[in-house]
Image: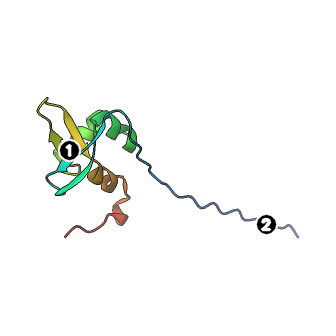
């Protein structure tokens, strides 16, 4: 009689955000807190999507964003973290 071997692999995903070029701490009006703000290029790298996808998420309100006096778009780190979660694990905001 042949033996059967079962291999189970469990994985976890962790997103680490380090201070890099294109990151600053500012007040997010939607969160009401001081948060890490990222450039659209950095945000695209974190979510592993294109800059166009980031713009679409901002337009749909999935990502919080602000425009600086220099007309630069910055993305809220808190909303970026929530957008990176699977849909069934998104925290309920009251």
Q: Quadrant of the N terminus?
A: bottom right
Above or below, 45 against 27 in this view is above
Q: Residue at x 59, y 61 (%)?
A: 10
Instruction: Answer with mark 1 or mark 2, whichever residue precedes in sequence.
Output: 2
Q: Position of residue 87 (x, y in %)?
A: 34, 60
Q: Does residue 27 appear left or right of residue 22 in this picture?
A: left
Residue 11's image quarter? bottom right
- 90, above or below 26, in the image: below
Quadrant holding the C terminus:
bottom left
Look at the image and tell me whether residue 48 can be seen.
Answer: no
The Cα–Cα distance between marks 1 and 2, rounded to whole angstroms, is 50 Å
Determine if residue 42 is in view.
yes
Residue 56 percent coordinates (x, y): 22, 41
Please give the residue where the numbered disc 2 appears in the rendered image.
Answer: 4
In the image, which disc is placed on residue 58?
1
Q: Residue shown at 19%/44% (left/top)?
A: 65
Name above or below for residue 53 compared with residue 78. above
Residue at x 41% of width, y 44% of height: 18
Residue lying at 26% horizontally and 69% vertically, measured from the top left? 92
């Amino acid at each position: 009689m042949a033996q059967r071997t079962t291999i189970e692999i469990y994985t976890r995903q962790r997103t680490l955000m380090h201070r890099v070029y294109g990151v600053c701490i500012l007040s997010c009006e939607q969160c009401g807190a001081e948060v890490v703000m990222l450039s659209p290029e950095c945000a695209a790298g974190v979510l592993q999507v294109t800059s166009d996808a980031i713009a679409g998420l901002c337009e749909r309100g999935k990502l919080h964003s602000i425009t600086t006096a220099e007309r630069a778009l910055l993305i809220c780190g808190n909303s970026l973290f929530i957008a990176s979660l699977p849909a069934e694990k998104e925290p309920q905001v009251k």
